[in-house]
Amino acid sequence: MAASKTAMASLIHYRPLTCAASASASQPARLVPHAPDLIKWVRREGGFVHEAVRIAQDELSGLGLAAADKIPKGSDLIALPHHVPLTFRPDGGAESVLADLAGKVPEELWAMKLGLKLLGERAKIGSFWWPYISNLPETYSVPIFFPGEDIKNLQYAPLLYQVNKRCRFLLDFEKEVKNAISDFNMMDHPFGGQDINASSLGWAMSAVSSRAFRLYGKKSLTGAYSDVPMMLPLIDMCNHSFDPNARIVQEQGEEQPEMLVKVVAEKEIGANDPLLLNYGCLSNDLFLLDYGFVIPSNRYDTIELKYDGALLDAASLAAGVSSPNFSSPAPWQQEILSQLNLYGDTPDLKVTLGGPDLVEGRLLAALRVLLESENESVQKQDLSTLKSISAEAPCGIATEVAAFRTIIALCVIALEHFPTKIMEDESMLKKGVPDTTKLAITFRIQKKSLIVDVMRDLSRRIKSLLSKETVSAKG
């Protein structure tokens, strides 16, 4: 662990880039025990911080920002001049090596690109951003740093795949980095002569993914702005909420030719209230992978399934639906499935349940089409109607009930793939477990609860449809 800039400079002339899993997921230590005052630093660099904004410790969220006094709606909370955000714009020299390395990073792992710059600045004595970097967490509670047993404890195949993919990338990228910097002397070394390994790369990638914002960069000749990841000192200490009380804005004008990044109060903020931003309408998979937390009852969370004819045949039979033909659709059904990209040479077979739509439109449309034997009744509907759950029974009540029952059976199959039940998970949490184990168990509880909620919702819809059918028959 780094001690302080002056002390480290006098002792060994660099800051070690080691990293380990977080001992405490909720309140990890800072890189430096007594880091510089970030508010004072931002103000000293020409930034603005509202007099009522303070850094506060929250038992659940760790360090964050809060209001010491009431702040009116519309007030500027924080403003950063253009030179304060940490971005990666290679300008030759050692940074050209980082740019070459960044070019080998897949776009989905964009955080690693800026992470290279962050690691370089962390190692550099006298870095402009050291007051900010020293305030970053020493460790992160994201799954790439989980013990092997807690990765297994996630129990959810799509997330396990992503975690393993990231771990493999870091191990492979470590070799790329070592090869790229092996011939550099101490003066020109992009990381101050230090050894770079998968752990330090993982720390940098996690720091960026959990704190950076993708904002507007420079204006192009066409008038469009580029999309640039930025680490925003102090601003990135605002915690997340789907009901935020603040938002980020960017301003540029004649008096301010360079982009100014601000946080503005969206509503009146009461004394002691935390400052909250919306990180995005994300699933718990992304919140855990990139931020290291799970949101209970996340209305944007989904469960991922594979569209598979044999599986759907089994589910519909289990649901008591007669004569399913998911494995052998008729030519007219194949045509519609192709339009849904669920059939053909390169189909996208990943479908989801949950989220605002409850059932992904492509899956719902496919079920409605495949459970309807009459081509004419389907052809009356456009694709957007077939995909919409709010379009009540477009192919008739019997087809709609069969579709919902098939999905419920799919949910039962999905639940059976989890080795433990919700009650067992809750019992484990009550016994007291390490923070990483708690995160993994909480994640899988939320996935199972989501499946149960989908089943309940569809069951209510079936009951409503059948009651309407009864009323119609009596009428």
Image (tube, rainbow, N blue to C red):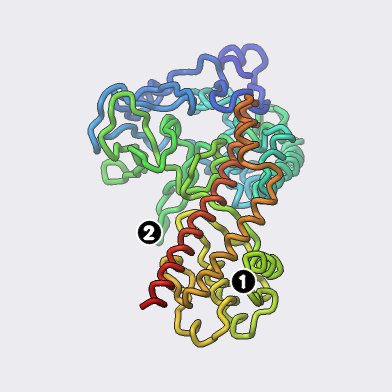
The local crowd at label 1, few if under 14, some if 14 to 19, many if 20 or more residues have their Cα within 10 Å, is: some
- Quadrant location, the N terminus: top right
Amino acid type of the residue tagged 1 in the rendering: Val
Query: In the image, what residue occupies the spot 41% across and 54% down?
Result: 225
Q: Is residue 99 above or below residue 356?
A: above
How far from the left and from the top, in percent, is residue 171? 75, 40
Kindly give the residue lying farthest to the front in the view shown: 474
Query: In the image, what residue occupies the spot 47% across and 42% down?
Result: 213
- Quadrant location, the C terminus: bottom left
Judging by the rendered image, the residue that carries numbered circle 2 is: 223
Residue 123 visible in rendering: no
Secondary structure under tag 2 reads: loop
Residue 402 visible in rendering: yes
Judging by the rendered image, the residue that carries numbered circle 1 is: 321
> Could you tell whether 181 is left or right of 288 in the image?
right
How far from the left and from the top, in percent, is residue 343? 64, 74
In the foreground, 224 or 379: 379
The quadrant in which residue 97 appears is top right
In the foreground, 399 or 122: 399
Secondary structure under tag 1 reads: loop
- Residue 344's tag is none
